[in-house]
Amino acid sequence: MSGLLSKSIARSLLSGKPGMVYAALMPQSALHGIAGDENSPPRVLITGGLGQLGTGLAKILRERYGRDNVILTDINKAPKSILKSGPFLFADVLNLKSLREIVVNYEVDWLVHFGALLSAIGEQNVPLAMQVNIEGLHNVLEVSKQYRLKLFIPSTIGAFGPDSPRNPTPDLTIQRPRTIYGVSKVHAELMGEYYNQRFGLDFRSLRFPGVISADTKPGGGTTDYAVEIFHDALKTGHHRCFLGPDTRLPMMYIDDTLRSTVNFMEVTSEKLSMRTYNVTAMSFTPREIAEEVRKYVPELEVTYSPDERQAIADSWPQVLDDTNARHDWGWSHQYNLESMCRVMFEKLIPQYNPVDDAKYADTETETVKREAL
């Protein structure tokens, strides 16, 4: 071992930052993620990449940074369209050694951690949720610290609980969630902030509301009724809602969600007054979205049959206060309830009624006119 390298290790130990020892021991070929060219685009690793957000974010980042600079990973088999779009690898967040190998071999700079079990699914299998959402988080934190990555971990309205103020819910308030999903997200927020303060990790997190998308099917979340209602309207004309008609929750169209993520990752640390921010776009109830959907499918029938997800929803914010995100780094949403419904039908109608598009054309045109006014 060279004297220079030994001194580097000694300085790391004396500084109280043992994570730096890993960097000192790594070969120069593996240091891209630690001391790469600031003018070169980042290499981005996305875990849990086949979920609602991963594929969409990968597409945006590849357009910005280059096809081969975004590595999508998951434990599931990817469809051919995903394999053709850019690098895809198997990655289990519970396997720390595998994560390290990917970060080194692909010279990763940023890590976006989407691997998690959602609220309703997590309640059905708490031990698995603890493994994926908590043990997987620890591995991601350690890898990010070791290789000095910029780390993004999404949080959620589920990180709040019944003791939190619900309308509006600020960034900093009491958080006592009642689901394993929410508990694991509070754990992620606090651990990320600790790693930022203790080790200098560039940790960032956004608390997302319910995310609405036409590109992926509902995945068991408590806000998924707001996606199911569009599919049901076009398939059967009847929607059975698992929440009560007046259950208000904050929501976001997926394009706004992905744009907020990219903007947040690109902003300099100096502009951030905190490491975890609320972001939102709209808040509505099942009754209100049903009324908007009926502008496109007037015959839609909705029945309300609250299940176990009602108790979860009743503990979550009704309106998120995202003032700090708008002030610190210029967050601004583009879609409200009306424009979100319009774009959802534009995307879904061809899937369900490819020969009947004209049936909805007049309604869509009128919606656009009203929006313009």
Image: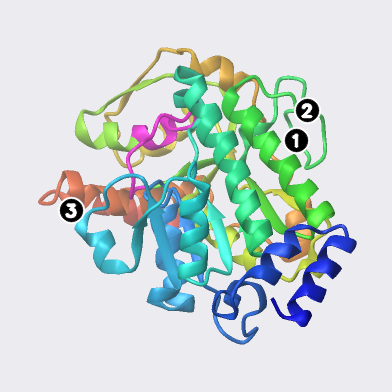
Left or right relative to 253: residue 354: left
- Determine the secondary structure under disc 1: loop
On whether residue 221 falls in the magenta region, the answer is: yes
Q: 70 or 177: nearer the eye?
A: 70
Q: Which residue is mark 1?
A: 168
Q: Residue at x 78, y 80 (%)?
A: 3
Left or right relative to 28: residue 10: right
Q: Look at label 2 and name its amino acid.
A: Pro
Residue stretch rendered in magenta on the structure: 214-229
Q: Residue at x 18, y 53 (%)?
A: 358
Q: Look at label 1 and name its amino acid.
A: Pro
- Up-down: is 306 above or below 55? above
Q: Specify few, some or many for label 3: CA neighbours under 10 Å numbering under 14, 14-19, or 20 or more.
A: few
Marks 2,3: beta carbons within 8 A: no
Which numbered dot is residue 165?
Answer: 2
Which numbered dot is residue 358?
Answer: 3
What percent of the width, then of the height, locates residue 227?
39, 37
Q: Look at label 3 and name its amino acid.
A: Ala
What percent of the width, then of the height, locates residue 349?
23, 48
Marks 1,2: beta carbons within 8 A: yes
* N-term mark: 2 or 3: 2
- Determine the secondary structure under disc 3: helix
What percent of the width, then of the height, locates residue 231?
28, 36
* N-term mark: 3 or 1: 1
Disc 3 and disc 1: Cα gap in Å? 41 Å
Q: Specify few, some or many for label 2: CA neighbours under 10 Å numbering under 14, 14-19, or 20 or more.
A: some
Name the image quarter holding residue 169. Answer: top right
Q: Residue furthest front?
A: 1
Disc 1 and disc 2: Cα gap in Å? 7 Å
Dominant SS in magenta: loop
